Image (spheres, grey):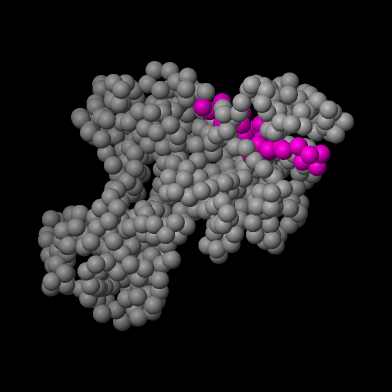
Amino acid sequence: MKVIIVGGVAGGASAVTRLRRLNEQAEIIIFERSGFVSYANCGLPYFVGDVITDPEELTLQSPESLFRRFRIDVRVKHEVTQIHPERKAVSVRNLETGEVFEESYDKVILSPGAKAIKPSIVGCEDRVFTLRTVEDTLRIKNYIDQKKPKTAVLAGGGFISLELAENLREQGINVTVVQSANQLMNPFDPEMAAFIHNELRRQGVNIVFGHAVEEVKGHENGVEVVLSGECILHADMAALAIGVTPDTALAKDAGLQLGLKGSIVVNDRMETSVPDIYAVGDAIQVKNFVTGEDDLIPLAGPANKQGRIAADNICGIDSRYGGSQGSSVLKIFDLTAATTGISEKKARSLGYETDSVVLSPMSHASYYPGGMVMTMKVVFEKNTYKLLGAQIIGYDGVDKRIDVLATAIRAGMKATELGELDLAYAPPYSSAKDPVNMAGFMIDNVASGVMKQWHIEDADKLPRDGSVTLLDTRTVGEYQRGHIEGFYNIPVDELRERLDEVDPGKPVYVICQSGLRSYISCRILEGNGYTAYNFAGGFRFYQAVMNDRALIKRATACGMDN
C-alpha cells in the first residue's frame, strides 16, 4: 500500500506516524510545501517574544528524525499542485528546483491547513506579516532584531493576534490591535471578553474596535493601515491575523465536495466524497459536538485526532470522529482565558433557550496563601439543563476547571450533575467545594426554584420607578466605594432586623460583590415571603463589564479606547 500525505504540521504528521505504527510495510510519502514538516504551530508567537529562544525547539520532527524512526519519505519544499483521482496520482512541484513530476497513490490524506485572510497590501510586503509557519516566525523575529520597530498594528482579535500582541509588547513595542467587532476573542461572550480587554489595556495594548482593516500601504519606513471609516493608523510594522479560510483549492480542483467557506466535507471516518481520499485538520468541515451542526473549528487537538482516525481507517480499523467542541485556553500576559463548548451568544443565535450562572470562586482554599479569584460562566439549556459551554478567566487553576467542564460536556452530563463530581481537594490546589461543584450547586438551585436570577443584560431594564426594590447587601464601606445607581444598601448581616425597610409587595433585585451574600439575602427574603432575584456575577463582575463598555463607547479617533 502506498499512501501520500499532503501537508504536515498537526494532522499530517499525526497521520504518518500512526500509519507506520499500524503498517510496517506501507510506502508513506509526505509532501510539505514549507521547509518544516512538523512544528509547534501554537508556540510560534513565543519565539517572537524570546520566551522560546532556540528555533529548533519549534520543530517537533524533522525529515531526518521521521525517516530514522518511522522510515517515512518526507519531502519538504514540495507542493502538490493537482490530484488526479481518475488515475490515482498527484502532480508535485519541487519548489527549490522547479521540477514537476507525478506520484501514484493508493490512498491520499489531505492536510493543507488554512490560509490567512489578507486585505490589499501595497508597496510594503517586507513590513507586513502573517504568522502561520516557522518561516513566518523567523521573518518577524529577524525584522524586529534588525529594524528595532517601535510600533506595530495587529489586525484581528483572535488567538494568534493576542498572543503576538503580548510577545511584541514584551519586546517593548507599542501595540495596537484592530478588531472589526466590538469584542476580542469571539468564542467568549462579550461580558467575559471584557476581562480580556481590561488586561490588555492594563498592559499598555491599544485596542481599536468597530473598524476593519481595508488596506495596508507603505509609508516612508513604515506602514499606513487604512481602516473602514477613513481612519489611518501609522506604524513601523503590521501583522495580519484577521482570520483564516480553509486552503482547499487543491480539493476543489479535484472535484471533492466542499462545505462551509469552501472547507472539505468529510464523514466521521475522515473520508471525502472521492474514494481513497481523506482529509484532516483546519481545512475540513466538522460536526460541532454540542450542537450537531456543521462547523469550522481549526484547532491543533482535533487535527491530531483526525490524523490518527484517517490512518486507522486506511489500515482497516473502524475509527470515528465524534465532533469538535472548541476547547481552548489562552495566556494573555498574567491572565488565563479558557472556553469549551459554545457561548451563550452563539447558543441563542442557534435558537437555544439558555440560562447561565456566573461565579467568582477562588483558585484554591481561601485560607491557604496565594489564592486568586477567577470568573466562571457556565451556559446550559433551560428545561433540559443540557451543558452547552463554559468560559473561565482568571490566573491559577483556570485550565484545570475548563478541562473538567469539557469532559462533562463530552460525557453528556447535565449541568445539574456538576455538583456530584468527586474532584481532588487539598488546600494548595482547590477547595472542598471545587468551583466546578459550586457551579453545579448554583444550577441545581436554579432548577429547583431555590434561586431566581437576574443577569447583566437586565441591568439597564430594571425599572427605576419604585415598582421594584433594588437592594445592595454589601458592607457600607463597599457600597460607598461604588454601587449601581438606584440600589439601596442593607448589609446582609443586618437584613433580618431591617426587613421593615423592604416593601413585601414588590419583587426585590439583589446584588453583592460576588453573588454569595446576595444569594443568602435572597434566601432570607424568600423565607419571609418576598420574591427575590440574585444577580449572576456580583458587583465585581458588573463593574468590570460596565467599565469596558464605557471605554468602548467613549472611543477616541479611529476607535482607540485607551
- Nearer the observer, 259 or 221: 259
Residue at the location (34% across, 23% down)? 233
Residue 160 horizontal side relative to residue 247, left or right: right
Q: Position of residue 532 (x, y in %)?
A: 71, 37
Q: Position of residue 229 (x, y in %)?
A: 30, 22
Question: Is residue 534 in view from this perspective?
Answer: yes
Q: Is residue 60 above or below residue 53?
A: below
Q: Is residue 124 above or below residue 262?
A: above
The part of the chain drawn in magenta is 526-549
- Nearer the observer, 240 or 533: 533
Question: Is residue 302 in view from this perspective?
Answer: no
Residue at the location (57% across, 40% down)? 335
Q: Position of residue 486 (x, y in %)?
A: 67, 21
- Nearer the observer, 165 or 173: 165
Q: Within the image, what quadrant is residue 292 found in? A: bottom left
The quadrant the N terminus occupies is bottom left
Residue at the location (81% across, 25% down)? 501
Q: Is residue 423 above or below residue 366?
A: below
In the rendered image, the residue lying farthest to the top is 557
Residue 422 horizontal side relative to residue 279, left or right: right
Tally of numbered discs: 0
Residue at the location (47% across, 19% down)? 554
| Residue 86 painted magenta | no
- Nearer the observer, 517 or 7: 517
In the rendered image, the residue lying farthest to the right is 497
| Residue 539 painted magenta | yes
Q: Position of residue 399 (x, y in %)?
A: 58, 51
Residue 332 horizontal side relative to residue 19, left or right: right
Q: Within the image, what quadrant is residue 16 found in? A: bottom left
Q: Is residue 55 above or below residue 495?
A: below
